Amino acid sequence: MGSANALVKEAKRLFHGRGQKQNFNIDSFPPYLVIDSFVDLDELEKKKIVDENSDCEGIFYRNRKKREAFTALVGEVPTKHFLVENNLKFEISFQGNQNIGFFMDMRPGRELIQKLSKGKMVLNLFAYTCSFSVAAKAGGAKKVTNVDMKKSFLKTGEKNHQLNELSGNVQYLSYEIMKSLSGLKKKGPWDLIIIDPPSQQKSFNLEKDYPKLLGRAASWLSPGGQILACLNSPFHGSEFLIENCPDLEVKEILYGAFEEEELESGLKMVLFERLKN
Ligand SMILES: C[S@@+](CC[C@H](N)C(=O)[O-])C[C@H]1O[C@@H](n2cnc3c(N)ncnc32)[C@H](O)[C@@H]1O
């Protein structure tokens, strides 16, 4: 694993402006540079970025707000690519107008899960492409169960496990989570549960579903079990999670990898723990 991944350099956010005055991000996925914007950048601004990064093989741009696909300012958009984080490898894609398959800001969450997972039964809810699951297996998890309603995301998740030779004892369930609560309970008890729902999607009503899910998940834990609850809504702070999980103890509050103008309006995560008895 180490030597193959050494050929791909670590992914890095070079500029984080989402939701701020300069409303765009620039990420380096060597040898490419990716500009993910939430406003139209004018030709002069794009040229400045291109000129400052003349060593990149490809520079790609899109306006996310307009649901654009990436277009190449330099080079050609590849059909797929790989990134490395902490010596773990993940497949990403710059095709279409979707997320690339990996959330860079979740790095502190993945690092915590890798640290906590040794010997544990892990449930990864809203798994997407299973980056939490890869981190959990790298940290020595006994078994990881990934749940996401989209089969195609879980397929990429399976590939991510294969890329890292961490495929043993990993399960993929394409369930609609709020309709599968009793089934998930039966598969437990769980030592570690990750909850990372979308903040604005019809499939999950944050105000109504998150409190219900937190309450149920707390009752699926083994003694001493933990929940990492993640939240990326600018309208809800970590208090929202804490108020809705009264039966567990708060162990730690974490934030996303990139500095925000207002800490609590960006990504936040709360680690909860059930008492041992
Ligand atoms: C924010 S992403 C999760 C990111 C992931 N935890 C990571 O770190 O890469 C949200 C995911 O939730 C899934 N999803 C949304 N609503 C769902 C539901 N009701 N049941 C199951 N999966 C759902 C989406 O398909 C998407 O993959």
Image: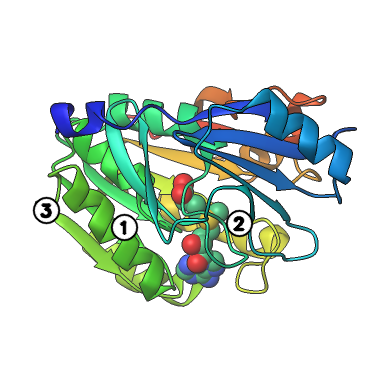
Tell me the crowding category of disc 1: few under 14, some 14 to 19, or many 20 or more residues within 10 angstroms, Cα based.
many
Q: Is residue 164 left or right of residue 173?
A: left
Query: In the image shown, does 41 or 160 lie closer to the viewer?
Result: 41
Query: Mark 1 belongs to which amino acid?
Result: Gly
Query: If you read the primary sequence from the N terminus, does the residue marked by circle 2 or circle 3 appear first?
Result: 3
Q: Mark 2 or mark 3: which is in front?
A: 3
Residue to which mark 1 is pinned = 157
Gap in Å between the C-alphas at discs 1 and 3? 14 Å
Of the 4 image quadrants, the one containing the N terminus is top left
Image vertical order of residue 131 relative to residue 253, above or below: below
- Horizontal arrangement in the rendering, residue 124 relative to residue 41 (left or right): left
Is label 2 within 8 A of ligand 1 (CB to nearest ligand atom)?
A: no
- Residue 191 placement: quadrant: top left
Which residue was labeled with disc 3?
A: 169
Nearest to viewer (mark 1 / mark 2): 1
Residue at 30% in and 24% down: 115
What amino acid type is highlighted by mark number 2?
Tyr
Residue 166 in the image: above or below residue 50: below
Q: Could you say whether the residue bearing mark 2 is in a helix, strand or loop?
A: helix
